[in-house]
Amino acid sequence: MLVDFRPHTRLRGTKPVDLTTSLVPVVEALGEGAVDLAKVRVVSDWVQYRENFRDVVDLRPILHSAPAGGGAVPVPMGAREDDLEVAVDVRRSHDVALKELTATLLRSAPDRAVLEGWGRGSESLVWDFNALYWSALELWEKATGCGYEQALPGGESDARNRDAARELIDGLFAVWDRLSASNALPEELYVVELGVGNGSQAKVFLDEFRDRDREHGRGYYRRLHYLMCDYSQHVLDLARETVAEHIAHVSSFALDATRPRTSLGFLQYKVFLVYISNVYDNLPTDEVAHLGGRTYCVQTRAYLPAGEAAELAGSVAASTQELPALVHKLLRLGPALLPEAAAAHFPDVDSAVGFWRRAWAALRLEERYVPLPGLDTYPLTPVTGRVGQIPLSGELLRPLLESGADVRMHVNNGALASFVDSLMLLHPFGTLVCHDLFVTDIEGYRTHFRGPGKYDGSVVNWVNGPLLAHVGRRRGFDVHYDRFRHRTGGNIVTMTAQVRD
Ligand SMILES: C[S@@+](CC[C@H](N)C(=O)[O-])C[C@H]1O[C@@H](n2cnc3c(N)ncnc32)[C@H](O)[C@@H]1O
């Protein structure tokens, strides 16, 4: 048996994790059960998100071959072939009857309302919930009485930070002054922001830009075009109101941040700044793992635990069997239209919003490990056939997966696609700046839980910084990570990407 205790820093300090109550009962239950102990991994995490998709103990089957139709998977010499991973959240495990809980799970599969089939994490319906949250944000915020920013670390976005905006603007002015001196500065100065939220980031940038330009005296504000992009029309409308005083310099685009060039192709090589904050951690992602010498894709499937499912179904005069169809209807139509489509269950919009919030709170993800037949068979970004779009091969993961001990990490497929597509927009002297939750060292995946968690109605996963940097460098860009300098104590890191000199 292999026991992987990831949050080792929690073994010290004022309230150290007590292994005898938080982990040992799991091992005891395994000892008394029927599983082959030589083929079990026990993995402990500290799941820092109070709202998340995990139970205190989860069982994750480790498949030896891809499910039907997946083809044969070669087994490397000397690889461990485990059957089962037992995952324990040690933040919560001392509060429950841990041994009994684990023994019950080992005896038989628990009763659940399963909402979808097994698939890659990036394909799960949790992303439909995420998109619904942003498109119907107004209804959600009305029901909770809280704005989305309150769920972000620190209670507000670091993108509002004026010192950070000034530093960025001064950098832009320096580049433009140099280009201007050699008559190489285009008349139109483009800045693209992806994922604008309520527009606070855009407003801070535009206010500071106007003020700095007044002092600088080169008339850059007059030439500025700020393009606000988001996939939620509601969010774009909010942001437009926020930047009303700058509206002559602002356009908005409803687009998917994972494919900015579908709408912004006309700006290829013309954009001086692509500006992103707290968006990459909100884009669909798979997870992959290298365990005992084999590489796996983590497959997931969303479910509601039986008790919560029965309660939820009862609250809308439905049976548990009807629940999956109602959830899918909610995700397809949104809460505003649900009362029309399912009047017997939802008398009004408020009841549909209540159903949405309760379903989201109860939502969990089952996981299993499925061996990958070869990294080259796993495209990291979609194969679209679009001109200039080369899918990224899973081979890019190899140096990170084979970097030492067992590791499980995010692929951040959505962020990768967005990043690569955005680089194509950049002027040769342009910069991509992204404030987000980056893991900057693969070791960080071996010691800390990095998601998924729930931020209010949305999904959060940390972003695989070494992977983005590796991909950027292969494309001729310098990619740097710096701790966000303008606030102490936060986890936000700033990524900067520029064409290599
Ligand atoms: C957490 S908010 C961040 C807002 C703002 N940048 C900030 O830092 O406060 C995430 C934003 O990304 C947008 N978003 C998420 N996924 C997106 C996608 N695939 N395409 C476009 N926008 C997306 C959401 O609608 C939302 O406005």
Image (cartoon, rainbow, N blue to C red):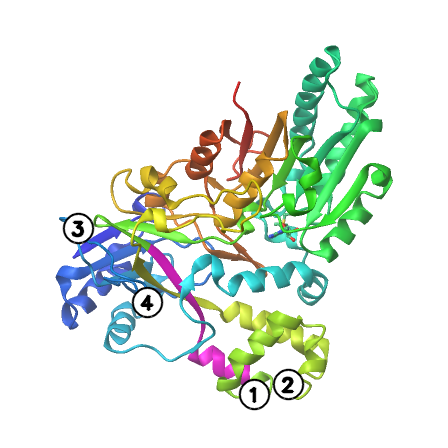
The residue carrying mark 4 is: 69
Q: Report whether 440 appears left or right of 132.
A: left
Q: Which mark is residue 318?
A: 1
Image quadrant holding the N terminus, namely: bottom left
Nearer the N terminus, badge 1 or badge 3? 3
Amino acid type at circle 2 is His
Task: Specify whether residue 101 is painted magenta.
Answer: no
Label 2 Cα crowd, 10 Å radius (few <14 / some 14-19 / many 20+): many
Q: Report whether 38 appears left or right of 193.
A: left
Image coordinates for residue 239, horizontal then vertical, percent = 76, 48
Q: Which mark is residue 345?
A: 2
Give the distance between the C-alpha atoms of the residues marked 2 and 4, in whole angstroms.
39 Å
The residue carrying mark 3 is: 79
Give the distance between the C-alpha atoms of the residues marked 1 and 3, in whole angstroms.
48 Å
Whether residue 473 is visible: yes
Q: What stretch of residues is rendered in magenta?
A: 297-313
